[in-house]
Image (cartoon, grey):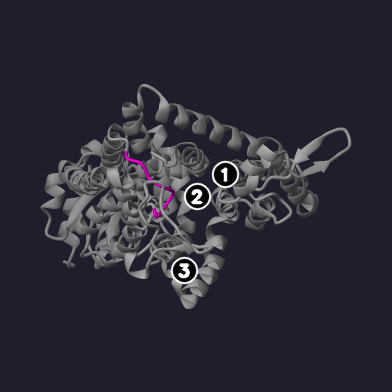
Amino acid sequence: MSKFEHDAKELLKLIGGEENIGAMTHCATRMRFALKDPDKAKIKEIEALPSVKGTFTQAGQFQVIIGNQVNDFHEDFVKLTHISSTSKEDVKAAAESNQVWWQKVMTFLAEVFAPIIPAIIVGGLILGFRNILEGVGFQALGQAVEDGVKLTNADGSPVWNTIVNVSPFWSGVNHFLWLPAQAIFHFLPVGITWSVTRKMGTTQILGIVLGITLVSPQLLNAYQAPGAFAEGAIPQWDFGFFQLDMIGYQAQVLPAMFAGLALAWLEKFWRKRVPEYLSMILVPFLALLPAVILAHTILGPIGWWIGNIIAEGVTWGLTGPLKAVFGFLFGALYAPLVITGLHHMTNAIDAQLIASNEGTVLWPMIALSNIAQGSAVLAYWWMTRKNEEESQITVPSYISAYLGVTEPAMFGVTLKHVFPFVAAMIGSGLAGLLSTMTSITANSIGVGGLPGFLVIQQPYMLWFFVAMAVAIVVPFVLTLTFKKMNFLTDAGLDFDIPFFNNK
């Protein structure tokens, strides 16, 4: 008898037999099953097998943790059945019947972002480092001076010099690091349109070209658009009887996502209808050009329209009679807003609040949301700290989140496993509620993480530290609690992150 034959035979029986297996495969450490009836699996008895180190269900897949000898276990298991091992993608497809609609939507979004995660992690660490260099004032560096006048905040407190103010070397480093950071975040639509076409199985170079048309230097930069709208200085393409605004979509997610889906749909549509001998010539042309036109006439403006609605709603919430309720809702929902890319609209609201009220009550909630995501990842790292593969993702992700950039944390950990994401939303919501109830105000936009206290106005500093404690402790404790209770632990999104999961 081979080493794992007995346990493999018992596992087959305990998961409901061969007739209950829709598809199966394995990865670096786990057996993965798409079970026809997941309720037939006897989890406690399976976990009692000597070879099994644990089980969990994710994205409709029942996964049995074996460890580094999973290849040998898999070979013994296959010998007992008439089922051949399939690819991960086949198992995912078979397991989709066990997913609810929202899991399918979130899985699609996650799989679009998964290939971009390594770049986002790099960009997050770079932006976090640049935030410290240029956004954090240190008393030891002295008070900032402009035109011979010492600078002060709205509350009269001194504005301290940052590292870049006093060091030409670090100023140069900071300036140079903007090169890769801008490439990653400002040109994010290129990565998104490429990833959408990759996910949809269409021509990836067309996705790249489409993405470039959204961020071309010919277009007005998206960050300059609000000011240009106010001044009536939007550049336009003039077609004689109508004009079209030349606006870019730097760092925007929804316009890129919509455009990528349109391109993929058009390519599939024309491939079914254009004769094969003309396909190479006509299909790319008939797919790309209409997709570019749709992106700049319908899809892009729709993204802006959605963003404006959200911005107006946020402004009303901050100033309306239900601002305490709004604090909880905004705190809880800011992270999902980041997924869509619409969180960039809050910059305009912050700027208006600072101009009108000499401070913003919105930005502190954003900083607290980032901290909450980092704390949820920190809790997940604590649970999986002995797993080197997981630590490659969790460690840089929570560092990045604590320094103000949460995309690596969300797409690499919390959103992928769902229950840490919910824990972070609850913690962020409670911190946001406390923030609005105590009117915590920031002098300006700062480093959206742990160093965020540096821009909080002095009268609200203590309350902000209390809110920070809530954003740190609640997500951490809830993540551990949800795992122990098995709450939403079977609702995860199963997608692989290239580079990290390449075994």
Q: Tell me where residue 213 appears, x and y as whole percent.
A: 69, 52
Q: Tell me where residue 288 appears, x and y as whole percent.
A: 72, 48
Secondary structure under tag 1 reads: helix
Labels 2 and 1 touching (C-beta < 8 A): yes
Residue type at numbered disc 2: Val
Q: Nearer the viewer, mark 2 or mark 3?
A: 3
Secondary structure under tag 3 reads: helix
Magenta stretch: give its range.
440-447
Q: Tell me where residue 404 appears, x and y as whole percent.
A: 39, 54
Category of crowding for the residue at label 2, using alpha-carbon neighbours closer than 10 angstroms: few (below 14), some (14–19), many (at least 20):
many
| Image point (40%, 30%), residue name | 318
Category of crowding for the residue at label 1, using alpha-carbon neighbours closer than 10 angstroms: few (below 14), some (14–19), many (at least 20):
many
Vertical position of residue 134 compared to residue 488: above or below: below
Category of crowding for the residue at label 3, using alpha-carbon neighbours closer than 10 angstroms: few (below 14), some (14–19), many (at least 20):
some
Comparing 260 with 128, the one in front is: 128
- Extreme residue in the right direction: 240
Residue type at numbered disc 1: Met
| Image point (45%, 72%), residue name | 166
Labels 1 and 3 touching (C-beta < 8 A): no
The residue at which mark 1 appears reads as: 257
Comparing 30 with 145, the one in front is: 145
Residue 75 as seen in the image, left or right of residue 383: right
The answer to whether one can see residue 390 in this image is: yes
| 2 or 3: tag closer to the N-terminus | 2
The residue at which mark 3 appears reads as: 165
Q: Quadrant of residue 38?
A: top left
Residue type at numbered disc 3: Asn
Comparing 349 with 281, the one in front is: 349
The residue at which mark 2 appears reads as: 112
